[in-house]
């Protein structure tokens, strides 16, 4: 409840300061179509895959990052820097999978996160009649959404590596 209150207050503050885009905090919030060129993304099967078809594909990260910064950063923070943002920290999306050591189970766990990610993005987030995040269904194509997911994954991986080298460097 505390977190929810904080987020609602964030919205009210944004609205009062007039710093938000016109659609933020609006119950009928509509997601604006992205201007980022997605034509260079590798082709994938039609429809929504169960698992990120771009997983581990470094070539899509740049486009994913541009899409993220254009569409999501206003609430989740530029380059996923979530400090003082209304939206939750997307770098924590996979925290439940990090302790799963079995490789096959780990992949299944990531697949569950993929499912939740796509569902959240397509439907948006609505709590107690307040639209917290607009639905992106029909606005962001499957390749665009998976490219964003891949950008987030690449940052999660970078963070994990940085943690490992920090531990190694410790006396
Ligand atoms: C207008 C603000 C806003 C925008 C724009 C926005 N989000 Fe969100 N998003 C939120 C809020 C607020 C929540 C938390 C809602 C809740 O828990 O009810 C959220 C939740 C999520 C979640 C679930 C996270 C979790 O930990 O449960 C995902 C995934 C997500 N957003 C991805 C995205 C992506 C990807 C984009 C860009 C395509 C995006 N969001 C754009 C505000 C936004």
Image (cartoon, rainbow, N blue to C red):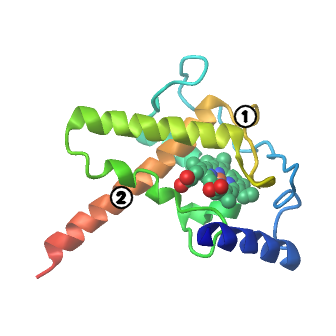
Instruction: Report x, y in % for residue 104.
Output: 25, 32
Which mark, by number, is residue 158?
A: 2
Q: Are marks 2 and 1 in contact (CB under 8 Å)?
A: no
Q: Is residue 60 visible?
A: yes
Q: Which is more N-terminal, label 1 or label 2? A: 1
Q: Is residue 40 visible?
A: no
Q: Is residue 7 left or right of residue 101?
A: right
**Rendered residue at 86%/56% (across/down):** 23
Which mark, by number, is residue 137?
A: 1
Q: Is residue 17 left or right of residue 120?
A: right
Q: Nearer the viewer, residue 103 or 168?
A: 103
Mark 2 surroundings within 10 Å by alpha-carbon count, few (fewer than 14), some (14 through 19), many (20 or more): few
Q: Nearer the viewer, mark 2 or mark 1?
A: 1
Dot 2: what SS?
A: helix
Question: Residue at the left extreme?
Answer: 171
Q: Nearer the viewer, residue 31 or 117?
A: 117
**Rendered residue at 22%/36% (across/down):** 103
Specify whether tag 1 is near ligand 1 (CB below 8 Å): no
Dot 1: what SS?
A: loop
**Rendered residue at 53%/48% (across/down):** 62
Question: Residue at the bottom extreme?
Answer: 171
């Amino acid at each position: 409840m505390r977190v929810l209150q904080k987020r609602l207050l964030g919205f009210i503050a944004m609205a009062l300061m007039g710093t938000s885009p016109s659609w933020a905090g609006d119950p009928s919030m509509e997601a604006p179509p992205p201007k980022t060129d997605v034509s260079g993304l590798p082709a994938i099967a039609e429809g929504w895959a169960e698992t990120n078809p771009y997983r581990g594909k470094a070539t899509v990260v740049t486009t994913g990052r541009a899409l993220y910064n254009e569409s999501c950063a206003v609430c989740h923070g530029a380059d996923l820097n979530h400090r003082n943002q209304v939206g939750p920290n997307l770098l924590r999306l996979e925290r439940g999978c990090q302790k799963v050591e079995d490789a096959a189970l780990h992949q299944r766990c990531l697949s569950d996160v993929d499912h939740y990610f796509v569902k959240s993005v397509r439907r948006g987030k609505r709590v107690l009649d307040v639209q917290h995040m607009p639905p992106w269904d029909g606005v962001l194509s499957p390749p665009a959404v998976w490219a964003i997911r891949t950008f987030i994954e690449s940052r999660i991986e970078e963070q994990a590596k940085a943690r490992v080298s920090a531990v190694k460097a410790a006396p």
